[in-house]
Image (cartoon, grey):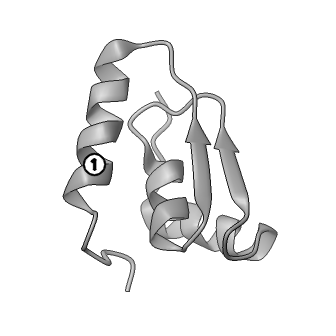
């Protein structure tokens, strides 16, 4: 497990991509990277083998649909 802070991942995504770019996270885990991408206006693809982590990531994305926890 290696969950990183959302703000740190967000800064990396902001510096390495533009709005509407696609961010790929091949080891999605709990979805921090895809959540940051979503909140920054990027499209995202997350890949995860564990059904448990897929459920966690999906829940985080749904719960943050209208929230801007970064800003």
The residue at which mark 1 appears reads as 60
Measuring from the top left, give residue 12's x and y in whole percent. 68, 66
The extreme right residue here reads: 16
Measuring from the top left, give residue 45's x and y in whole percent. 60, 41
Mark 1 burial class by Cα count in 10 Å: few <14, some 14-19, many 20+: some
* Quadrant of the image occupied by residue 18: bottom right
Measuring from the top left, give residue 61's x and y in whole percent. 32, 51
Look at the picture and state if 5 lies above or below 40: above
Look at the picture and state if 32 lies above or below 55: below
- Residue under the image location 25 percent in, 73 percent down: 66
Look at the picture and state if 44 lies above or below 66: above
- Residue under the image location 37 percent in, 26 percent down: 54
Q: How many marks?
A: 1
In the drawing, does residue 61 fall left or right of residue 38? left
- Residue under the image location 53 percent in, 51 percent down: 33
* Quadrant of the image occupied by residue 13: bottom right
Quadrant showing the C terminus: bottom left
- Residue under the image location 45 percent in, 70 percent down: 39
The extreme bottom residue here reads: 71
In the drawing, does residue 29 fall left or right of residue 63? right
Measuring from the top left, give residue 58's x and y in whole percent. 31, 39
Look at the picture and state if 65 lies above or below 32: below
Disc 1 is placed on an element classified as helix
């Amino acid at each position: 497990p290696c969950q990183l802070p959302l703000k740190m991942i967000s800064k990396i995504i902001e510096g390495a991509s533009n709005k509407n770019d696609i961010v790929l996270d091949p080891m999605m885990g709990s979805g921090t990277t895809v959540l940051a991408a979503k909140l920054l206006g990027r499209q995202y693809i997350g890949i995860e083998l564990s059904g448990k982590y897929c459920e966690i990531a999906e829940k985080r994305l749904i719960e943050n649909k209208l929230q801007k926890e970064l800003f």
